[in-house]
Each structure stands twice: as structure tokens, then as C-alpha cells.
Image (cartoon, rainbow, N blue to C red):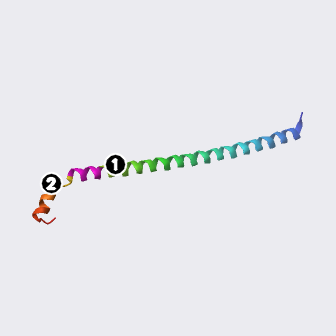
Amino acid sequence: MFTGLAGAALLKVLEALFNAFGAGFNDWLARKRAENNLYDLGRAETTSTINKESADAERRANEAAVNRPDVSAVVAGMERGDTF
């Protein structure tokens, strides 16, 4: 269909056009993957923080339950007039 110099020039122009489109599309996909990775990382960090804080709260609650004073001893001390 195209012959000679005009055909070769048109092929070079089309090749450059498609290469530019492909490079732009690859860049767009790379940006989207990076955004998704950042989103996933943020989600994982948030989950980790929540799990750590929950474990710390549970540990503190267990320590408070183990170290709490005996109610009957406190009541008896109050009846005797002990200072706390």
C-alpha cells in the first residue's frame, strides 16, 4: 500500500506513536499499583496498631484482675479504720 520513503516514514511515526502510548499506559499501571500498595500498607499498619493496642489493653486488664485487692480484706480494713 505504502511504498518507498513515505511508507517508511509513516511506519516510523506509527511505531513511535504506539510506543509512546504503551509507555504512558505502563506508567499509569505502575502508578495504580503503587497507590494500591500504599493503601494495602496503610491498612496493614492500622490493623497491626489496633491488634497491639488490644493486646496491651487485655494485658493491663489481666494484671488489674490479678493484682486487685481482696474485697473482704478492704471492707474489714475500712471497718477497723485502716488507712489506704
Direction from residue 56 to residue 22 in the image, left or right: right
Q: Position of residue 5 (x, y in %)?
A: 88, 40
Residue 67 lies, with reference to residue 80, above or below; the image says: above
Viewer-nearest residue: 57 or 52: 57
The image's mark for residue 72 is 2
Direction from residue 28 to residue 83 in the image, left or right: left
- At mark 1, the secondary structure is helix
User: In the rendered picture of this protein, how many numbered marks are placed on residues?
Assistant: 2
Amino acid type, mark 1: Ala
At 18% from the left and 54% from the top, the residue drawn is 71
At 86% from the left and 38% from the top, the residue drawn is 7
Mark 1 or 2: the one toward you = 2
Residue 6 lies, with reference to residue 65, above or below; the image says: above
Q: Which residues are magenta?
A: 59-66
**Tag 2: Cα neighbours inside 10 Å, few (<14), some, or many (≥20)?**
few
Direction from residue 43 to residue 63 in the image, left or right: left
Q: Are marks 1 and 2 in contact (CB under 8 Å)?
A: no
Viewer-nearest residue: 4 or 12: 12
**Tag 1: Cα neighbours inside 10 Å, few (<14), some, or many (≥20)?**
few
Upstream in the sequence, badge 1 or badge 2? 1
Residue lying furthest front? 79
- At mark 2, the secondary structure is helix
Direction from residue 39 to residue 45 in the image, left or right: left
**CA distance for labels 1 and 2:** 31 Å
> Predominant secondary structure in magenta?
helix
Q: Position of residue 2 (x, y in %)?
A: 89, 35
Q: Position of residue 73 (x, y in %)?
A: 13, 56
Quadrant for the C terminus, please. Answer: bottom left
Reply yes or no: does residue 64 show up in magenta: yes
At 53% from the left and 48% from the top, the residue drawn is 39
The image's mark for residue 55 is 1
